[in-house]
Image: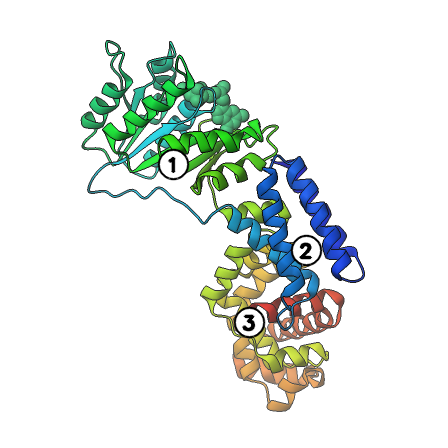
Amino acid sequence: MLDSLREGLQNAVAKLVRGNVVDEAAIKEFIRDLQRTLIQGDVNVKIALEVTERVQRRALEEKPAGGVTRKDQVVSILYEEMAHLLGGEGKVQVDKTKPSVMVMLGVQGSGKTTTTAKLARHFAKRGFKVGVVAADTFRPGAVTQLRTLCEPSGVEVFSNDREKDSVKIAREGRKHFEEKNVVIIDTAGRHKEEAGLLEEMKEIVREVKPDYTVLVIDGTIGQQCYNQALAFHRASPVGGIIVTKLDGAAKGGGALAASAATGAKIFYIGTGERIDDLEEFVPTRFVGRLLGMGDLKSLIEMVKAAEVEVDEKSVQRMMSGKLTMDDLLYQFEQMKKFGSFRKVVEHVPGLSGMVNTNELDKAEGRVKVYKSIIQSMTRDERTDPERINASRVKRIARGSGRTEKDVRELLSRYRQMKSLAKSSKGREFRQMMRRMGGQ
Ligand SMILES: Nc1nc2c(ncn2[C@@H]2O[C@H](COP(=O)(O)OP(=O)(O)O)[C@@H](O)[C@H]2O)c(=O)[nH]1
Ligand SMILES: [Mg+2]
């Protein structure tokens, strides 16, 4: 998905990261690379310039926080600004006390009917009662298309073959589905003339008073997205956007542009022709994907939720390669706090390949055993585990009610951790731990 945009952005970032210094010249070159990539990726020129200028200004003015490198800082500024450009997270809220009504707007072929069926299924699967209104009276076979697409999901479709006025059908359908939780009205995307189409949309919206006026935009039309979104938005204010066909040749910039033109948030993206090819849109995740950084926001939130504090002293000791059993226990407990440490590791690009996640899973399950063993050690043994010889292993095993094998396993885990701490991988690991706790 969006291969060229992603490649361009990642190349620009890689070039910056590879460079020796991040000085003014390097930042300016980075900005030029970004501009070229965004514009080639169909992002509206004005928007591309605005966002890159903001990145440049902040990159030149802001000082990195403690423990954060210049390079990391510039990349995270880019990340923030791109996510900001896409607007916050938008969602359709379903209120069970009355129907949430959505009207689908967009030109013919943008994917309204397909998306209507996808959405209907999306909500039906979540246990909501869904009704779909076929208000496209222009296209022959529109009703049949909608029925065929909705049937497998068991979603009821309202239509009226005798009525030619789409505004009336929308009104009738709205009434008919008074008992549903979600009502989606599919409209025509074509009219004798464009002004007529926009006028009809306006009337439907006036008549139905939807909770969500949803604009469906074809992600492959590139630069036109901006003007199309603007035209619809002027006729009836757009509440949410769905960008379709992001699976194919779409360069993706159009998605950015439609959101910026209307100020509306992107609710969903269509990623294929099949009924389940609909994704909730999370801007930070989208940008993370573009920049190849994983889902940084959810990582940060996960860490916050776990309220991981980083013991500076423990980190210091690790840095110097002097690891005690208490430090190790501390590390294990932090992992436990994450719920599943594997999830965290998988979210950090670059780290996932370096840490054996199977080992981590096992470690999680073993923490209780290790804890009781460590508690049976003397203070000297905890600070300097290397002094634990065979007879001590025996004593500790007896004292803790564990087997000698368990004790030896813990010792080998200790040695592993110690050598990891000394290696370059360990440096990155520690940096990450500190960053999590620091900011
Ligand atoms: N690849 C792909 N095709 C899509 C997607 N959404 C819709 N389409 C296709 O786009 C064409 C037009 O869709 P349709 O729903 O009839 O558009 P409408 O005229 O706006 O109702 C159909 O061939 C759909 O299968 C998508 O997310 N990905
Ligand atoms: Mg249609």
Q: Position of residue 135 (x, y in %)?
A: 31, 20
Residue type for callout 1: Val
Q: State the mark number for residue 350.
A: 2
Q: Quadrant of residue 22?
A: bottom right
Q: Residue at x 41, y 30 (%)?
A: 232
Above or below, 141 against 421 in this view is above
Say which mark, if any, is on residue 238: 1
Q: CA distance from mark 1 to mark 3?
A: 40 Å
Q: Which residue is rendered at x = 44% and y = 22% of the image?
A: 107
The residue sitting at 54% across, 67% down in the picture is: 335
**Residue 227 seen in the current view:** yes
Question: Which structural element holds mark 1?
Answer: loop
Mark number displayed over residue 437: 3
Cα distance, mark 2 to mark 3?
19 Å
The answer for how far apart the CA atoms under marks 2 and 1 are is 39 Å
Could you tell whether 252 is left or right of 138 in the image? right
Relative placement, left or right, of 235 versus 11 is left
Circle nearer the viewer, 2 or 1: 1
